[in-house]
Amino acid sequence: MKSQPSENNQKSTHQEDQQHVISQIPFSIRLDDLSRELCLEERPDDLKILKEFVDHALEHARPRACYKAFKVTVVDVHKVSIGEELFQSEVLALNTASVAQVFPFVVTCGNELDVNSPSGADLLFSYWWESIKEKVLREATEYFLRHLVERYQLREISFMSPGSGDLSVWPIEQQRQLFRLLHNVESSIGVMLTESFLMLPNKTLSGIAFPSDGVYLSCMVCSRAECSSRKAAESLELLGSLRANLSHCPVTAQPGDSLSR
């Protein structure tokens, strides 16, 4: 089942630092895949309710995204300067050492799915509804990344998110700087950053996208073996390769220098 593909972009050019909004991103939800994930294939009564939930989501969901294009400067092996903000992450510095442009972004399933939730207080129904919201976010993220590839004529693209992976990969507290780069996120796409640096609606993804030669996932540089959300195995070879790449790229300051923000 698929929503009507209605996209409404803000009028924009490829100028750096102009905010872009993609509204009402098209998405689809495959009932057979969802029912299999929720182990409901042999439960016809539950399948009927799940189909009603999916139809409800297709009617009400308005996934959207906002982003900006920025030049990036690797200050040293642990610091990256983007716009007026300084980010401290060795892995972010490694991933952006050889690129000219990055794309801070926020993608959300939309607060309409919270306002119009049919699950009520039932815990099982709430779990189903959260699974549907997750699928909407996943589709919206894939659409957004394809949008960047096509708009900016990139070969491949990857992204990093604050708080994803080990604490040392990129601290979640740097959500604050990310949201400052994207002015008025709440008014433009309805996403609020809480004092604990989580986002509302809860099915929202933030990060910095960057051109890449291959697929990068934070799981590849994360040592948490028991993580239920792991999407790829840890790769020490990847980290070594990224560090070797940075050693051949100029930086604008010596290690230990900093920017005051």
Image (cartoon, rainbow, N blue to C red):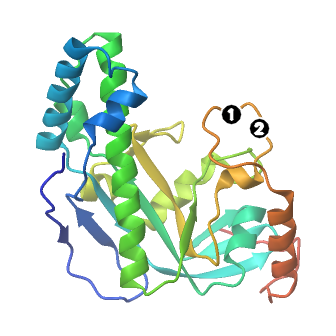
Check disc 2 and report its element: helix, strand or loop.
loop
**Residue 7 in the image: x percent, y percent?**
17, 66
> In this rendering, is residue 216 above or below 189?
below
Quarter-of-image position of residue 15: bottom left
Where residue 63 sits in the image (x, y, percent)? 26, 52
Kindly identify which residue carries mark 2.
Answer: 224
Residue 200 location (% of width, % of height): 37, 39
Q: Residue at x 36, y 88 (%)?
A: 14
| Residue 118 in the figure: left or right of residue 181 | left
Q: Compare residues 94 and 196 and report the one nearer the observer.
A: 94
Instruction: Write down the quadrant of residue 121 in the picture.
Output: top left
Residue 45, placed above or below residue 3: above
Q: Which residue is mark 1?
A: 227
Q: How many discs appear?
A: 2
Q: Residue at 36% across / 83% down in the picture? A: 151
Can you tell which mark lies on residue 175? none
Asked whether 1 or 260 is in front, the reply is 1
Could you tell me the amino acid type at mark 2? Arg
- The reply to whether dot 1 and dot 2 touch (C-beta < 8 Å) is yes
Q: Relative to 162, does residue 31 appear above or below in the rendering?
A: above
Q: Residue at x 87, y 77 (%)?
A: 244
Separation of residues labelled 1 and 2 (CA atoms): 6 Å
* Residue 164 relative to residue 256: left or right: left
Residue 260 shows in the view:
yes
